[in-house]
Image (tube, helix red, strand yellow):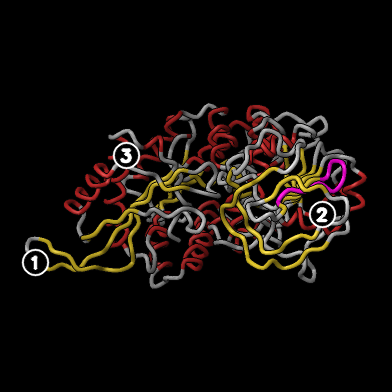
Amino acid sequence: MENPIAVIDFGSQYTQLIVRRIREFGYFSKLYQPEELPTIEAPPAVILSGGPRSTLEPGAPDIDFDYLRSLDVPVLGVCYGMQLLNLKFGGTVAPGHTREYGPAALLPVEGGVLFDGVRDHSQIWMSHSDTCKMPEGTKILGENLDGIPVGLQWAEGFYGIQFHPEVSHTDEGKKILKNFLSIAKNPTEFRIESFKDHLIERVREEVGDRKVVCGVSGGVDSSVLAALLHESGVDTRYIFVDNGLLRKDEAKEVEAQFRTVGIEIETIDASKRFLDALAGEGDPEQKRRIIGRLFVDVFFDAVGKDVELLAQGTLYPDVIESATSGSIASTIKTHHNRVDRIMELKAQGRVIEPLDELFKDEVRDLGRALGLPEPVVGRHPFPGPGLAVRCPGEVTEEKLEIIRNADKIFINLLREKGHYDRVWQAYAALIPTKTVGVKGDERCYEYALSLRAVTSEDAMTAEWVHLPYEFLGEVSNRILNEVAGVNRVLYDISTKPPASIEWE
């Protein structure tokens, strides 16, 4: 697809959300690194993202401003992007008296396209510590309650905002982005059906006449990837690895699921191999690396070293949280499909990741466009490292069995009571400590368990679900009565950020 709206990535954890929002409006958008700007020939508009760095730092990310102006298209700077534009137009940036993270209120100052129709005192989401001193002639479009400018215009078509319009915490962020896009020059339309055709062509071009091995888990990502490879007609072996970190009865369910969509999979029981490799390891990053490396080893042990391509259902949140979309981003956690062995294979051109620009909800829509049944595309996300990230500390079979049995009760009751489809992801996690309790009039010393249920659009941010007390009480009673080794059940009411969705 040609002429995307260009989003320049300065490393914010939310950058791809901008791309995703633009697609929601029906326009095609792509992410670029700052040094790629001179390669972009005819974008309808350019957005400069936020980032973790300060423009005051030596070696701070920069852009070719002369080239940017030569494009003669609307430009929007977000947070870091706004501060960078302020410097380019002759202003200054200085450390603020206080850091500003979280909610604030927006007060539009004067009319104009950017804040057209945006109400006074609507909530915006801040994440910065520097402030701008504007050059002469700068228009102040909006302020916060302290009178600090949070919306600027330096010249015709050049805008800046000090908050993140892309996150759901900014009440009218979508309207602000849509206002900006209203002045974009002939943006290319985006529909998932046409993007499906684009991905099929991408797969065929990347694969050529090489053979592919695709790891499947039964989750949405790998199921959609398998369907995409199948639709593309490339030579693929589909391998399902039972790593011993799956939920209760999951291996049998996955095999049955793929039979219904006409894809033949091979199952490898490597559970002992994974659990042996994880024995004694409690560090979450090391656990992810062990699992990621072993997945690759199991694949290549099964199919031989001559396999040209490994296909992965990597999504964009995996990329950005592992800080592999560019050196500017900060690492949040290493995903199992971004470990060093995978990156070595990528460097050799032996990994294909067709879904790596998409978010979970877009992948679901793609699955529907590929004809996958609703129970497959509507399935809750399940992490690649499996129950290992829901078992903080050392992973043991005893702990896994507790998690499996509790999780089964929780998920089944969510389905029975009609809550499953309004929850984006739900699970039970073991808390790595034991607590005193009473069972059968005797003292017991057993594990505490956490239940988590969140709503999210894309895994970049998440809100906890307000499940009814009566429902939570029923889940807790069932777990305490039916799951050996647990004497306390808690409900996790943490948002992301600051917490992640998974425990590790």
Q: CA distance from mark 2 to mark 3?
A: 49 Å
Give, as a single range, the part of the protein colored magenta. 150-158
Task: Give the residue pinned by disc 2.
Answer: 85
Camera-near label (2 vs 1) is 2
Number of the label disc, if any, that sits on residue 120: none
Q: Is residue 137 left or right of residue 46?
A: right
Residue 237, position as x, y percentages in the image: 54, 42
Residue beneath disc 3: 414
Q: Amino acid at mark 1?
A: Glu
Query: Can residue 306 be seen here?
Result: no
Image spot of residue 329 (x, y percent): 67, 60
Whether residue 112 can be seen here: yes
**Image spot of residue 243 (x, y percent):** 41, 55
**Horizontal side, residue 484 vs residue 276: left or right:** left
Mark closer to the observer (2, 3):
2
- Which amino acid type is marked by label 3? Leu
Residue pictured at 61% horizontal, 58% vertical: 342
Q: Amino acid at mark 2?
A: Leu
Q: Residue at x 24, y 42 (%)?
A: 470
Q: Disc 1 marks which residue? A: 442
In this rendering, position of residue 134 left or right of residue 385: right
Question: What SS does tag 2 mark?
Answer: helix
Whether residue 163 sits left or right of residue 459 in the image: it is right
Tag 1's secondary structure? strand
Q: Nearer the viewer, residue 49 or 245?
A: 49
Closer to the N terminus: mark 1 or mark 3?
A: 3
